[in-house]
Structure formats: structure tokens, C-alpha cells
Image: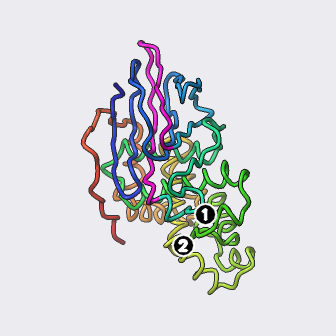
Amino acid sequence: MARPIRVFDGSFGRLQLIEAATGEAPHAAVAPQIVIKHEGADVDFQIDGQSQRLTRNNLLFFNPGVTSQALLAASSHAQLLVFQASGDWLCRSFPAVFEAGGRPFAAASESITHRIRQLADTLVIEVLNDQFLSHERLEFMLQELMLSIVETYLARRQSGSRLWRGSPFADNRIRKALAFLRAHPNKEINMNELASQVGLSRSRFYDLFQLSTGRSPRSYLDMLCIESAISKLSSGSGKIAEVSAELGFSAQSNFTRFFQQQVGIPPSEYRRAAAKPNTEPNTEPNTEPKDAPQD
């Protein structure tokens, strides 16, 4: 059987980091499921009798009711990120896509985008350092993952009016703003200029943004900056001062204070923890929200 390394339950459903195993019995998905390889050998899946290979360059989708089985050589190792999304949670954000009884995913396998690859790798870092992970940040990243999946793989198969019907993300101007913030996670972004860029007054922009995301633009940007910082710190790409400058902080001390307020420890400590992740299995589902650090 697959060995769970980390398990998280919440309103979003269940997120697992698992060690794939050979000889796993076939099982049917009870909810929409996404599987992304983190590291190790490629894994062959039988999905409703069809073969699909999972590599670092693609991701697999499982519609409810689909039967699958992972096939892995006995001497091989693979870590997989498995997100079994709650139908209710999905329907709150994308009701037209994940309506009851539907099969939202037209293809079992898709090439992975840079954005989704980055999100998946950052999620693995975060769940392995779960003593610093807040429930709020976990749900934010999973929402970002699903929004990226809907925009990347499902939007091209459905008309915009149909796809976004009833969704809090229905306003195309807010989706454009979100795309800009993701591409430029930088504290120096001028929100008044961004509002004008997407064709909204400042007040209307802030109101619509809050209605769509449940956050202010600044709060959303803060979460994106933390996600980007964790990705850069864990990959060892650049010094902390360089990460600070890339994210628009005028001084490294300001970045350190911001990071500690959001995560609970300084960036230097997080980098050390991420360099030596604890991969010992924790089979007890983590269901207790950890309070976000206070300013």
C-alpha cells in the first residue's frame, strides 16, 4: 500500500503527500482528484483500463467514479502529492464546473504549467514543515491550485459565460488582476495603478476583489509573496537579501519582520528547516487549524 507521509483534512477535502508503492489495489475516486509527482521514479497508472504515466512534466486528473491503480517497480521510489477535493468546497468557487454528478476533467493527463509546478513544489515544502504551516495558508494555496487548473485546462473547453457562471471569480477584471499579482509578487505594486489597468476605480476594485477572493488586494499579495519567498528559500536560489529585493522590500530587516509575522520564524530558520525536511510518516490527519501569526 502507499505510505502516507503527511495527511491534511479540512473543508477543502484531503491533501496527502504519499510514498507510492507497487501492488496497490485498484480503487475508485469518490471526489475530483489531482495527482502530481514530486520526486522519484515515474509512475504508471491504469485509469479505467487506460495506461497513463505520471512524470514531473504532467499531472493526472481523476473524475468521481474513475477506477485507478498505481504500478511502480518494487525497487523504485516516488513521492506523490494527492489532492482529493471536497465537492462542496469546489462548488462554492466553481459551481458551473463541479456541479453534482459531473465529470469536469476531459483528459486524464495534462502537461503541467510552470505556475502549477511551482505551487505543487511549494505545497510539498510547506506540508513537510507543517509545524510552521497555517490552515489559512494551506487553503489559500489549494484555492490557487484549483483556480489555475480551471483557468488552464478547463477554460479552453467551455465558453467563459458557462465556465464562470455563479463563481465568485466571474469578473474577468479581477481574474486579470490576480494573474498580474501572481506574475509580479512584489510589495511595491501600486494597487491604484492596478485598478486602473483592469478598468476599475480604486473603490470598486477593492470592493470586487474582496467579494471575489475574501481578501483585500494587499492581503492576497502578502500570501503570494510568502509563497514565492518559501519557494526561493527552499530551492536555495539566492541569498536572503536577494529574495528580499526581488519581493520589493527596501531592507532585508523589513522582509525578515514580514516573514516572521506571516510564518512564525525568520527566513533563515525556515531555509534551514526546508533543507532538512522531516519525511517520517505522520498518518494522523492534521485537522486542527494553526492560527496565523499575529502582527
Q: In which quarter of the image is residue 10?
A: bottom left
Depicted 133 relative to depicted 72: above or below: below
Placement of the C terminus among the 4 image quadrants: bottom left
Residues at discs 2 and 1 in contact (Cβ within 8 Å): no
Magenta range: 64-89
Q: Position of residue 7 (x, y in %)?
A: 33, 43
Query: Residue 89: which numbered mark, if any?
Result: none
Q: Of label 2 and label 1, which has the lower sequence position? A: 1
Depicted 94 relative to depicted 17: above or below: below
Is 58 magenta? The answer is: no
Placement of the N terminus among the 4 image quadrants: top left
Q: Name the residue under label 1.
A: 186
Q: What residue type is labelled 2?
A: Arg
Q: Residue at x 50, y 51 (%)?
A: 240
Q: Residues within 10 Å of mark 2 (few under 14, many from 20)?
A: some
In front here: 249 or 138? 138
In front here: 59 or 237? 59
In front here: 247 or 33? 33
Q: Disc 1 on helix, strand or loop?
A: loop
Q: Residue at x 46, y 63 (%)?
A: 253
Q: Name the residue under label 2.
A: 218
Depicted 85 relative to depicted 107: above or below: below
Q: Where is residue 77 in the image (x, y as percent from the top left)?
A: 43, 21
Q: Which amino acid does label 1 sit on?
A: Asn
Which numbered disc, 2 or 1, marks the residue closer to the eye?
A: 2
- Farthest-out residue, front: 101
Q: Where is residue 194 in the image (x, y as percent from the top left)?
A: 69, 74
In-image side of 15 versus 163 (left or right): left
Depicted 180 relative to depicted 80: above or below: below
Q: Disc 2 on helix, strand or loop?
A: helix
Is 77 magenta? The answer is: yes
